Amino acid sequence: MVRIRLKRLGTKMRPYYRIVVMDSRKPRDGRALEELGIYHPISPEGRQVDIKEDRVRDWLSKGAQPSNTVKKILNKQNITVK
């Protein structure tokens, strides 16, 4: 199954994440099929997320399932996830 999930980058206590499309059986920091955006949780509120909305909608239409955390991020960005 293909999932939209987070890939952790950064250093200790200063994480940032890439929002990626991956096979669900691959490790968290493994090779991604496509990178869809970034999530930087320690930035100011308005600058935490940068996302390619059209690509996310395309992957969702193809049947990719977002993780719980990504689903929350997408809903905050007004990208409807069922």
Image: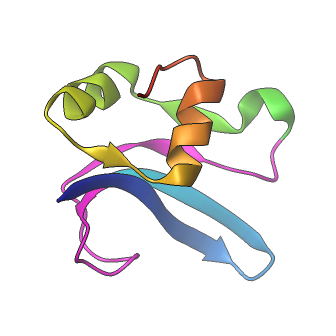
Residue 17 on image: x %, y %: 56, 58
Image quadrant containing the N terminus: bottom left
Can you say whether 33 is above or below 13 in the image?
above
Image quadrant containing the C terminus: top left
Horizontal side of residue 73 vs 15, given as left or right: left
**Residue 75 found in image quarter:** top right
- Which residue is nearer to you in this view: 28 or 9? 28
As for residue 63 lying within the magenta part, the answer is no
- Which residue is nearer to you in this view: 34 or 61? 61
Residue 71 on image: x %, y %: 52, 40
- Which residue is nearer to you in this view: 49 or 81? 81
Horizontal side of residue 7 vs 39, given as left or right: left
Can you say whether 55 is above or below 69 in the image?
above
Residue pictured at 64% horizontal, 60% vertical: 16
Q: Which residues are magenta?
A: 21-43
Residue pictured at 31% horizontal, 46% vertical: 65
Instruction: Farthest residue to the front: give it.
Output: 82
Residue pictured at 74% horizontal, 83% vertical: 12
Horizontal side of residue 53 vs 51, given as left or right: left
Q: Looking at the magenta stretch, what is its main secondary structure?
A: loop
Instruction: Farthest residue to the right: give it.
Output: 44
Residue 81 on image: x %, y %: 43, 28
Residue 25 on image: x %, y %: 22, 77
Residue pictured at 55% horizontal, 70% vertical: 9
